[in-house]
Amino acid sequence: MNNSNHRIPVGMLGIISAIGIVYGDIGTSPLYVLKSIISGLPENQWSNSFYILGAVSCVIWTLTLQTTLKYVIITLKADNKGEGGILSLYALIRRRYRWAYIIAIVGAAALLADGAITPAITIITAVEGLNSLYSSIPIIPVTLLIIAVLFLIQPLGTASLGRYFGVGMTIWFTTLAILGLNRLLPNLDVLAAFNPMYAIEFIIQAPDAIIILGAIFMCTTGAEALYSDLGHCGLKNIRISWGFVKVCLILNYLGQAAWIIHNPDMVDPSINPFYMMMPEWFRLIGIIMSTVAAFIACQALISGAFTIISEAVSLELWPNVHIRYPTLIKGQMYIPSVNYILFILCALMVLGFGSSVNLEAAYGLAITLSMLMTTILLFFYFMKNNKPLWYSVPLTLFFLTIESGFFVANIQKFFHGGYASILIAGFIFVIMYAWNSGRRLKRDYNTFDRLDSDYLAKIVSVSHDKTVEKIATHLFYLTRAQSPHSIESKISYSLFEKKPKRADTYWFVAINRMDEPYRFDYEIEILVPYKVFRININLGFKVDMHAEQYMQLIATKMEQQKLVCLSSRYSSLKDKRGDSLYVIVERTLRNVDIYFIQKPLIVLYTWIKRKFTSDTEMFDLDPTSTLIEYVPLVVNEYENDSETLKQLIEQSQMSITGNIHLLDDESTPTTP
C-alpha cells in the first residue's frame, strides 16, 4: 500500500477541516482559563492590572513556547509516515529503545484520562453561562443530557456532522477574535502583556503564583491532541491554521483582560469574564455558540481516544477490543467499550464535582504528565536520527523545565480533585503494563519446532489418514513464528497430540504489525505443493485487522495462479468452495515456575484477556468457523527428567507389589 495515498492535500478545505478537528480543546479554553485565574488571586485583587496583565502574559508566552515552538514547529516534524501522536512517536523508536514503552504508556494513559475530564469541564462551563441569563436552569441535568447525546451518537458515525465541524469552529474562532477586539480597541494598554517581563514578574511576585500556573496551563491543554491529529489533517494544514487560531485566542484573552481591569466593581470569582465581556444582546447567542463549540471539541477528543486505543492494540499495548467502522471516512472508527467507559467517567465527573470551578481542580494534571512523556520520547527520537547533542539536549531540557514547572503547579491540585485524573490514568497504565508484560512473559516461554521434511511428511501423513476424522477442508493456524520454516510447539501439540487434525490444506498465517502506519503486503511460502502453505501478512499499525478477509483474498489469488485448489473435496459439493476452520491455540498457566513478581502480571493478563477481549474479535474471525484450543504454557517441561520419573514409577510399583497378600482360593477376605 502506497503511503503517499495518505498524505493530506494542502488547501482551504484542508485548513478549515484542521480548524474543526484539531483545535476543539484549545479553542474552548477561553471559557474557563481567566475565570480560574481570578479564583486563585488574593481577595479584592481580582482586577488588579499587575496580576491580570502578568497572568495574560503567561498565557501568551505559554501558547508561544509550548504550543507553537514545541508542537507546531518541532514535534510535528516527528511524524511516522504522516501520522502523529505519542504512540506513533514510540513506534518510530521502539526498535532501538524497546523499554521506552513504559514512557509511551504513561503518556497514552494520561491522554485517555484527559479525555474523560475534558468533555465534562468544557460542556459544564458552556452550560453554566446560562446562569447569567436564566438562574433557574438546572446546570447538572442539562450538562448530563448533552453528554449523553454526545456519546449515544457515536455508533452512528459523524460523517454527516464532520463536514460542518470545520465551518462551525471557524465561525467560533472568528467570534472569539471579534469579542476580544470589541474590548481591546478602547483599552490598548493591555497590549503590554506581550512583554515577557510581566509574566516573569507575575511568577516571582504574585501570591500563590505556583497554583495560578495550574490555571494558566489550561490554555495549552489541546496541544497534545494537535500532534495526535497530524495524520487526519496534515502538517501544513495544521501549521497554517494555527496562525489564525492563535491570533483569535490571544485577542480574546486580551479582550477579557481589558474587561476585567476596567470593570473592577463587577469582578469576583463567581462570574465568568468570557460571558460578561459580551454585549448583553449577544450573550444568549454566545452561550449557544459556546455549547456547540464544546460539543465539537468533545467529539474530537472522543475520536482521539478511539485512535489511541486502536494504535495501542496494534502495538500490543492494549487488550484486543472490538472496533467498528461506521463510515467510509479514513480513520473514523468506533470502539463500543471505550465509548461506554468514557461516558460513565464523564457523567461521574459531572455528578462528583458539580461545577466547573471544582472540575478545574481535576483538570490539567494528567495532560502535563503526557506532555512530559512526549518530550522525553522526542529526545530519543532526536538520538535515533543522529541529531547533534548541542541541539537535542538544550532543547529537551528547556521544555522539560517549562513542563516540570507546570507539573509542580498542577500537583498542588491533587487533593482538591487532581487525584481523579491520576486514578484514571493509573488504572489505564496498569492495564497497559499488565497486558504488554503478560504477552512478553508468555512469549519468553515460546518453543518452536522446525518445519523440516520429517515434520511436513507427518502433516501429509495425517492429511491422508482416513482413520482420523476430517476437521475441515482448509485448516488455518495463526502463528507468531518469525521464520517461515518454524512453528510454535503449541501448534504441534494441537496438530498431533491433543487431537490429530486432518484437513486437505494446511495454512500457517503470521500477521506482523509494522512500524509504518499504512503498510500492507504479504509473502507466500509453499512448503508442500497444493497442501501446506506459510503466509506472512505485514500490516501497518493503522491498518484495520480483518485476517479472514485477507486470507480469502490471498487464497483466491493463489487459486488463480494454480497454486492451490479451494474447491470442496466432498463429491456432492465439488462446485462449492471448501469449508475453512481457524484454530487459535491458547496457553494456560501450567507446568511452569515463574518469579513471584511475574505471577500477578500473568494472572492479571489472563483475567483481562478472558473478561475483555478475544483473539476471535481481534483478528475479525467468524466465531462459527473458529476453534479455540487450550494447551499448557509449557508442554514438555518434564522431558529432561524422564529417567527420574521412570525410577519413581518403578519404586512405586515395587512398593505396591511388596504389600500384596496372596489368598488361597478357599480363603475369603475378612472385613476389618
Image: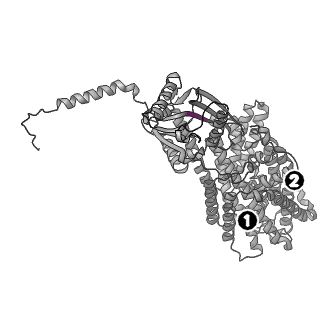
Q: Position of residue 64 (x, y in %)?
A: 83, 48
Tell me where residue 87 sits by quadrant.
top right
Could you say which disc has been placed on residue 244 in the image?
2
Could you say which disc has been placed on residue 584 in the image?
none
Please tell me whether residue 287 is drawn above or below residue 200 in the rendered image: below
Report the label total: 2
Query: How many neighbours does mark 2 have within 10 angstroms: few (below 14), some (14-19), or many (20 or more)?
Result: some
Q: Nearer the viewer, residue 296 or 216?
A: 296
Magenta stretch bounds? 506-510
**Left of 143 or right of it: where is 463?**
left
Task: Indicate the amino acid at tag 2.
Answer: Phe
Q: Position of residue 503 (x, y in %)?
A: 51, 35
At x 87% / y 48%, what residue is drawn?
Answer: 240
Task: Indicate the amino acid at tag 1.
Answer: Thr
Question: What residue is shown with label 1?
Answer: 125
Please tell me whether residue 60 is drawn above or below residue 84 in the rendered image: below
Tell me where residue 119 sits by quadrant.
bottom right
Please tell me whether residue 30 is drawn above or below residue 547 in the rendered image: below
- The stretch drawn in magenta includes residue 101: no
Q: From where the camera sits, is residue 591 visible? A: yes
